[in-house]
Image: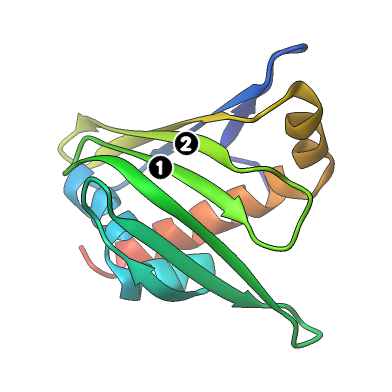
């Protein structure tokens, strides 16, 4: 299956730029990132906390096929509805350090919008380690589910 989510990783840099165009109006794309019930569906995770505001925090938990729980959390530094979210992202109990994420939401037409995620890692090595995981496949699959679930909300 073709990957509609693109990941740009420039050699020697500690960042990624992830871009995806959705066949969704801007407000629906943004809603899919901030409504806990929708986030749980497309991310396949449990939302323990999601405070969508400056200085808010978030906490998600997922269970792998072996029944092990994995936690993810962060702090929201900037929250502008239908425009942007700046947040930290931490995978608990791993050797990956906290990363900084800038999510930008842009309207393209009345029926399409684009998400651009600029992710900054502590080091080039950390970024490259992330790319060795099935990261690209996972984010594309999650974005495909987001599109499918949000289509039902139109």
Asked which secondary structure carries label 2, the reply is strand
What residue does disc 1 label?
87
Report the label total: 2
Reading the image, the residue beneath label 2 is 101
Front residue of 63/8: it is 63
Q: Position of residue 67 (x, y in %)?
A: 75, 88
Task: Determine the residue positioned at 17% across, 48% down.
Answer: 27
Residue 24: x, y in percent? Answer: 28, 48
Q: Which mark is residue 79?
A: none
Using the image, determine if residue 41 lies above or below residue 93: below
| Image: 73 above or below 70 | above
Q: Nearer the viewer, residue 39 or 96?
A: 96
**Residue found 27% across the figure and 66% down from its top:** 35
Q: How is the image coloured?
A: rainbow
Residues at marks 1 and 2, CA–CA distance in whole angstroms? 5 Å
Above or below — where is 117 with respect to 57?
A: above
- Label 2 crowding class (10 Å Cα cut-off): few <14, some 14-19, many 20+? many
User: Is residue 65 depicted above or below 19 in this figure?
Assistant: below
Counting from the top left corner in percent of width and height, residue 53 is at: 21, 51
- Secondary structure at badge 1 equals strand
Q: Quadrant of residue 83?
A: top left
Q: Is residue 136 left or right of residue 103?
A: right
Task: Please report contact status of discs 1 and 2: CB closer than 8 Å, yes or no.
Answer: yes
Badge 1 crowding class, 10 Å Cα cut-off, few under 14, some 14 to 19, many 20 or more, is: many
């Amino acid at each position: 299956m073709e990957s509609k989510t693109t990941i740009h990783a420039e050699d020697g840099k500690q960042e990624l730029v992830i871009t995806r165009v959705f066949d969704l109006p801007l407000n629906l794309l943004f809603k899919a990132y901030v409504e806990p019930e929708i986030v749980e569906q497309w991310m396949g995770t449990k939302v323990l906390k999601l405070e969508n505001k400056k200085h808010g925090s978030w906490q998600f938990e997922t269970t792998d096929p072996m029944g092990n729980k994995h936690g993810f959390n962060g702090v929201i530094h900037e929250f502008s509805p239908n425009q942007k979210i700046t947040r930290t992202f931490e995978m608990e109990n791993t050797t990956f350090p906290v990363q900084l994420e800038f999510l930008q939401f842009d309207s393209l037409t009345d029926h399409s919008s684009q998400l651009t995620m600029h992710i900054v890692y502590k080091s080039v090595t950390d970024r490259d380690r992330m790319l060795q995981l099935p990261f690209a496949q996972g984010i594309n699959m999650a974005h495909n589910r987001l599109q499918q679930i949000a289509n039902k909300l139109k």
